[in-house]
Amino acid sequence: MYKKRLCFTICIVLLTILLTYIQNFAQIQDKGELIEKDKHYKITAHVVDGSKQTYTYHYMIYNNVGKVVKEDEHYGTPPAMKYIDENTLQILLSAGTGTFFCSYYDIVNDRFSKEYFSPLETGYGRIVYQETSKGYKLVVCDIFDEDIYYGEFLLENVSDVLSPILEVEFVDKHTLYVKYQSGESLEEKSVLLSLT
């Protein structure tokens, strides 16, 4: 009787291992459904655990000669790719309602930026994001190299709400327009920040 149970247990374990291997092999063979493709990126959707409702999104970034320079997966919503200028690709990965992680690929110089959390604006090779660890400030810096440009700007009496910044726009390379909510009354204020 003991030998029968042992053989049965061994068979179940081997069958489980075999089924796991077959499932993993099938997932490896799965090329995924093409979501979007461009000269510099490709996004595919892959079914997770056989469910037609849950996907993982695989994305690849290509350099000018078609070589893969970055490859990763993202769960939830598909990555969003767009060109912010003719030489810079923006890679957005959702981090939940209204928030995202963002990085950039410099196609000409074949380099990636650091990852930014929910940036507010880009322009003239610069990025604007908020920093709230020690008070409320806006940071403006070169997307790829903070040694080229980096500036911090304190806004007066910023409201203590989730998203006090209403609008951010580069007027030109040296001027940033910011509209935000101020004080407990949420009064709208506008400022022009000099980036020189």
Image (cartoon, helix red, strand yellow):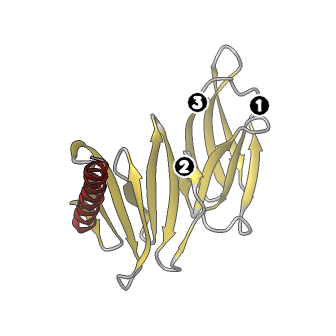
Depth order, front residue of 13/92: 13
Q: Residue at x 69, y 49 (%)?
A: 139
Q: Is residue 91 left or right of residue 111?
A: left
Q: Are marks 2 and 3 in contact (CB under 8 Å)?
A: no
Q: For the C terminus, give its image quadrant.
A: bottom right
Which residue does the image show at 68% across and 23% down from the upper left? 160
Q: For the image shown, how many numbered marks are present on the structure?
A: 3
Camera-side residue of 104 and 35: 35
Classify residue 179 by image quadrant: top right
Query: How far apart are labels 1 and 3 at the CA level?
Result: 15 Å
Q: Mark 2 vs mark 1: which is more N-terminal? A: 2
Q: Secondary structure at mark 2?
A: strand
Q: In the structure shown, which secondary structural element does the residue marked by tag 1 occupy?
A: loop
- Judge left or right: residue 134 versus residue 161: right
Quarter location, residue 10: bottom left
Residue 33's label in the rendered image is none
Disc marking residue 121: 2
Q: Residue at x 27, y 46 (%)?
A: 1
The residue that disc 1 covers is: 156
Using the image, determine if residue 98 lies above or below residue 57.
above
**Distance between mark 2 and mark 3 Cα atoms:** 14 Å
Residue 93: where, in percent of width, then height?
A: 44, 51
In this view, the residue farthest toward the front is 1
**Amino acid type, residue under disc 2 in the picture:** Glu
Earlier residue among tags 2 and 3: 2
In the foreground, 44 or 132: 44
User: Nearer the observer, disc 1 or disc 3?
Assistant: 3
Q: Which mark is residue 163?
A: 3
Q: CA distance from mark 2 to mark 1?
A: 20 Å
